[in-house]
Amino acid sequence: MKKIIFILIAVCSFTMLFAVFEYMPGNVQPRTMCLATTSLIMGIDNIVANPASISGVKRIDGYLSYENLYLFAHAATAGFGYKFNSSAVGLKYSEFFVLGDYADEDSILAENTRLHTERTVQLTYGGMLQDVISVGTNVNFLYLSQKNETQQDFNNLYYTVDLGLIGKIYDRWSLGISVFNLTNTYINGYLDTYRYYVERKVSAGLSFEPYTNLVTSFDVSKVSEEPTSFGFGIVYEIVKNTFEITTGVRSFPVSYGAGFKAKFDKMSVDYGYTGIAQMPSRHHVQISYFF
């Protein structure tokens, strides 16, 4: 019982910084840039910041990632993108879950049980208009499951819709705008008085490429009932088509990140290190393959 109480306290602390379905696993480069990537076209990796980024899929992209968060909290994701002549589609599956010991109403103890599970399936579609503006949309299907000691476990399914665009305003300047959770979806928990709010966010970003191998990106985001958040990120390609580094910072929640991408023919490996105020730092690993 003490272990259950400890885990529930930790989960509550986690949700103070992250609402339900706010944390999308994987996507190492956007994470290390603290999601200051609203104006960047980076393929399926960046649909967590702007659905219009799906137009950056090269031909057929696929990736897998896994993260161990805070000892008992885990996250994993798989993504796939396909490029047509003037448009692209993407499919992404993400899962965040918390493991712990669990005793039901008959006091039967089950070890390493999933106490909390969030599953997300994202369907993405987008494309370029006149080679100047990229538009895209996500349709997200959300599944939430929670263990309950006193009554039937809570399980339910929801959906949200996102929209975004990225436009080139000058040769080296790009502007991006994205809106997440247009449907204003919220989730009623197993207690009538408890309600989860799916993140509803509006972001605007501006990127500048001072050199052919360096991109800087500035982002302003606003989440309902939270302070306005400012982010800044950098992508620097040290060796062309082989090795690049990323870094970023954000004002709320106060966070930072750094990482690198190493490319080997059709495969790439991403590593990232991120930290958020009042939470332990995290390591991220992602393997991608381009067909």
Image: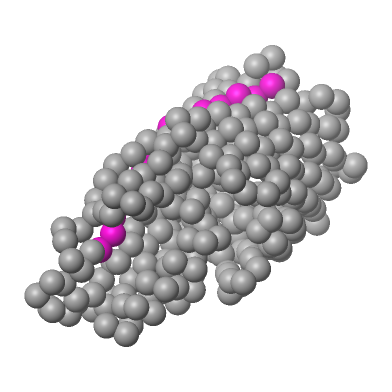
Left or right: 218 with respect to 75?
right
Viewer-closest of 257 and 204: 204
Q: Is 271 drawn above or below residue 182 in the view shown?
A: below
Residue 121 picture quarter: top left
Residue lying farthest to the bottom in this orientation = 2
Residue found at x 68% / y 49%: 227
Q: Is residue 66 something that shows in the picture? A: no
Q: Is residue 253 above or below residue 37?
A: below
Residue drawn at (67%, 31%), measured in percent from left and top?
Answer: 177
Number of labels in the image equals 0
In the image, residue 143 lies at what x, y percent?
Answer: 32, 47
Residue lying farthest to the top in this orientation: 130
Q: Quadrant of the N terminus?
A: bottom left
Quarter where residue 101 is shown: bottom left
Furthest-right residue in view? 210
SS majority, magenta: strand
The percent coordinates of residue 225 (x first, y second) are 59, 46
Query: In which image quadrant can residue 263 be found?
Result: bottom right
Left or right: residue 221 compared with residue 45:
right
- Pick out the residue farthest to the left: 106
Q: Is residue 132 above or below residue 33?
A: above
Residue 122 visible in the current orientation: yes
- Write down the region rendered in magenta: 133-147
The spot of residue 158 in percent (x, y) is: 34, 39
Give the colouring mode of the picture.
one colour
Q: Is residue 137 magenta?
A: yes
Residue 14 is situated, as x and y percent measured from the top left of the image, at: 49, 65
Please state if 192 lies on the left or on the right of 50 as rendered. left
Pick whichever, 215 or 2, lies toward us: 2
As for residue 234 lying within the magenta part, the answer is: no
Viewer-side residue, 286 vs 84 = 286
